[in-house]
Amino acid sequence: MVAQPLLRVVRCGGSRLSGARAAFSADAKYLFCASGDYVKVYSTATEECVHILQGHTNLVTGIQLNPQNHMQLYSCSLDGTIKLWDFTDGILIKTFVVGYKLFAFYTLAGSEDSVFIIIPKKNKEASGSAGQDIRWNWMFTGSAGHDLLHWNQSSTDSFQLVSVKLPKIADQEVEAKELSLILDDIGQSPKCTAFGREGEYMASVFDLHLLVYFFKKKKVNRFSLSATSTKGANNNFTCVACHPKEDCIASGHEDGKIRLWRNFNHKREYTFSTLHWHHDVVMDLTFSVEGTSLLSGGVESVLVQWRDGSDCKKEFLPRLGSTIEHISASPDGTFYCTCHTENKITIIHSNLRVSAVIQGLVKGSDVKTGLVVDPRTKALVLNGKPGHLQFYCLQTDKQLYNLDIVQQEYIHQVGLNQIDLVKAAFSAQGSWLATVEQREGKETELELQMKLWNYDEQTQSFTLNTRINMPHESHVTALCFRDTDELKDETLMLVTASKDGRFKVWVLVDDSDAEKPSMGWSCDFVGSYHKYPASNCCFSEDGSLLAVSFEKTVTVWDSDTWDLKCTFCHPPGKIQNLCFGRLSCSKYLLGTTSSGFLCCWNLLSCAMEWSAQLNITVLQPDPLSENIVAVSWLSEGSDLFVFKPNEPRPLCIQRNVCRGRVQWAVFIPREVPESVGSEKHQWLSRSQLYFLTETQDLMTFSTKSTEERLTPSSKQLAVEESLTMTPFYLLLGKHRHQQQSKENADLGTAVVQNHLAQHSPAVKELLHTPAHVLPSASFLCSIFINSMLISKENKSAEEVAGEVEMDSEKAEDESDEDVEFTEMEPDTNPTEILGETTPKLSKSQEKELRKIRRMDYSWITAL
């Protein structure tokens, strides 16, 4: 019996790019950054993601180049492993299992077999004391088998720096259990520890203390500051950096000051100078490769370059968008890199000119617009920077572009009541976008503005068409377009609902005059029901009906005459979500209530079809099928139910999809339907469901196993049927194989298939094996060339079968003999080269290929 594939909750992208310091390759052609449990390799020239290094099962916390081989990369993670990668081919070379949560990672050129990591102090094995307990507090964000784990750190945890010896063993996964304590009671952040000139010393800051450890003398010097200065400034340390050539340590502080420490090998004769420009916390510091400049960044979104450690010689790169969290410098000194809180990486030339920007999914404190799909690009649209809509591509995990809705400068100051973007909706074809923005002052003050944006084909962006001040007297609770094909004979229609007890219908009208043709939006109808606040609105699939909820009552209106057709009431509880059924279930209307009921009404009989008691937080229909997804939330976690309105029994139930509450969910249609093995997972075949959690994690579902999901696509050798018919594609023999199979089926004869080129070991070696682990070219060249040549010899099926049978009997006897290749003359007919003639291998060639299959390639594992 074949086991049914499990439905897994996986992170689909949108992870923070600023979770750890980014790193450059030695030639600065590539940039490495941590993105959740992945390591992404970007090209500094094109901004494209070249490789995704997949293998960790928890958040990646550190990235470093291998100082012994600049073509290799180390990464560490909260999953307790250190992994060594070949980043040029995206291949995992080796995994070192440490077993403890790794919060930071450092390498030194002088330490060939050891690296340095930061782990929690409350750990018996790491600290070496028998009386301490291991306090790992795991939090699963899903049910058993889920891939996402988060570390819940207690505020009382302290950390320590230890060295780890990496065993030189040929196995791909080895245990690294030999740990040596270097420094105790240090900060968790990688920015709080740095290594000095040629690894002679290391510096670590924590609270009001600076610790300097000298490796040769094995002594520690501690320097402390008072909590506040004479002027009341906060002296707490935030970050530290060491000069690469001199004995100088730079430290950042919460009051915005930078201190340069010298002569720190003496406890009492040390000196420091102060640099001050930042008005708030210094988030990160780093020296240039030669040490001639010090770079600093903070909440001002400005990169400051201090020349020669002087307060007078400083340069600025302003308007970088958001708070700078990390700063990195390339080994060749050509680039700098800044990581920002808005999930952005900026690559900067050494002359402080922006070279490239890599923008991920911007995560805010609250997604008020919900998850919306752009019908044109199939991009995910939601709140981005303050006052902006971001268009995010799920396939590339990159932001396509930002649309400035508010069109006002955002002031970064706590307590200010600024304009906020709260609603967004697209028309069916994506030609129109409606947005609502608001600003709340005092209790009686409310500013509302609705904007209608038209898509401009020439500029390939949205342009403002209509601005409506105060479309309602109170907050707008919902808005939706009528789902039509936007034909000329159809009237575009937008409906808004508000707490003022009204819903308004807006239509597109012709405002053209003799001088200039133009189209604009105006109010066509205003509806209400007993002056109750309107909370939700939605159109039926064909646009003929509009459902509007007023507290506990659902009203259904005719969209042509605006007559009230019927009402549905299901006390107690207010209506929270509304949606119509689709396709064969279009006669049903579904709603959820605050009292924990899911109700299904029949529009033909005007009666309730069925109801279920579930605390539903999200109700989302699939636009391509009758399926509807409902997510319920209890104190233990969120459960997902997939059902059809005409069948109260769910098609699929997925328990504990995440630990917290699911805020939003959306279906995104697939371009090509996906084949799903299990029948209960067929609801994922035409559309993919994405949902957003309380912690701003963007999640989706996958039926692939962990091994399949973590295997790079370059290693999955499945041949796609939709490949382009190029000459090289034909040369590999697929077309000939298909053609000959068809001929054999027509003739009804059993013909032994030849060893075609795509099944040749030589071809597989060249196409699917990394270049650095291949045998020499001279070894494979003759085999590869001969396997690609086309024989002039046309043998019958009986002769071919006879040769194969004879070869199988004598294979073992002749395996050790030297076999000479048969000299062959390739045909000059171009039609044969393109696959018109079926290639045939001689008897000696087939014997040689069998010898290759039996060769021992175990020497590859030693690399």
Image (cartoon, rainbow, N blue to C red):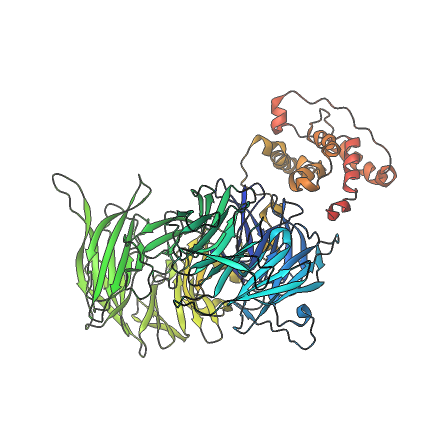
- Residue 159 visible in this rendered orientation of the protein: yes
**x%, y% of residue 77?**
59, 60
Relative to 142, is 813 above or below?
A: above
**Relative to residue 272, is residue 789 drawn left or right?**
right
Q: Can you name the residue that lies furthest to the left here?
A: 514
Q: Which of 696 and 269 is in front in this view?
A: 269
Relative to 25, is 165 above or below?
A: below
Going 22% across and 61% down the picture, which residue do you hit? 448
State how many labels appear.
Answer: 0
**x%, y% of residue 205?**
54, 63
Quadrant into which the N terminus falls: bottom right
**Relative to residue 253, is residue 458 drawn left or right?**
left
**x%, y% of residue 762?**
71, 36
Q: Can you name the residue that lies furthest to the top here?
A: 828
- Residue 149 visible in this rendered orientation of the protein: no
Quadrant of residue 811 within the rendered picture: top right
Quadrant of residue 331 within the rendered picture: top right
Q: Which of 175 and 65 is in front in this view?
A: 65
Going 66% across and 45% down the picture, which residue do you hit? 69
Q: Can you name the residue that lies furthest to the bottom here?
A: 572
Quadrant of residue 363 within the rendered picture: bottom left
Q: Can you name the residue that lies furthest to the front here?
A: 269
Going 25% across and 63% down the picture, which residue do you hit? 439
Relative to 801, is 493 above or below?
A: below
Relative to 166, is 775 above or below?
A: above
**x%, y% of residue 465?**
23, 48
**Relative to residue 706, is residue 673 drawn left or right?**
left
